[in-house]
Amino acid sequence: MSQNTEYMYRTRWSTNKFLAMLCLLTIPGLNIILLFYWAFFQDTSNTRRYFSRALLIWLGIMLFLVLTYNIINYYIGFEDFLILPQDVQDLAVELQ
């Protein structure tokens, strides 16, 4: 490993670098590509690599929870148990 790449892996990140990375991650479509690139290719710093891997794990957990909720909602019908805004309005009219 050359001295320049060793320096790249050991440097600490400033707040500006994190903000720039988060701004890039707000672009739809590009964010997933960048996360996979930063997480699994060797030419990125360790800080970016670990942050990207952690964010991919977090997104995977959230995707699993959303899909599980939607499947349960489709087959069981949780909407029967939820108070929706229209239900609240109908209840308010009945109480008057």
Image: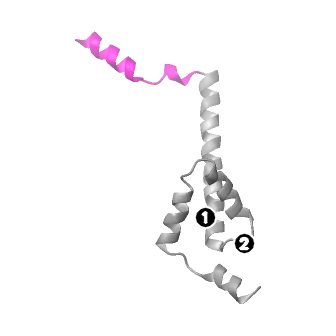
In this view, which residue lies farthest toward the left? Answer: 96
Residue placed under numbered mark 2 in the picture = 43
Image x and y of residue 34, in percent: 65, 58
Whichever of callouts 1 and 2 sits on the residue coming sooner in the sequence is: 2
Element under disc 1: helix
Image x and y of residue 56, in percent: 65, 55
Residue located 59% across and 47% down the image:
28
Q: Nearer the viewer, residue 89 or 81?
A: 89
Q: Residue 89 lies in magenta, yes or no? A: yes
Quarter of the picture containing the N terminus is bottom right
Residue numbers of the magenta segment: 77-96
Picture quadrant where residue 55 is located: bottom right
Quarter of the picture containing the C terminus is top left
Element under disc 2: loop
Q: Residues within 10 Å of mark 1 (few under 14, many from 20)?
A: some
Residue located 68% across and 64% down the image:
38
Q: Nearer the viewer, residue 39 or 20?
A: 20
Q: What amino acid does circle 2 point to?
A: Asp
Q: Are marks 1 and 2 in contact (CB under 8 Å)?
A: no
The label on residue 51 is: 1
Q: Is residue 96 above or below residue 21?
A: above
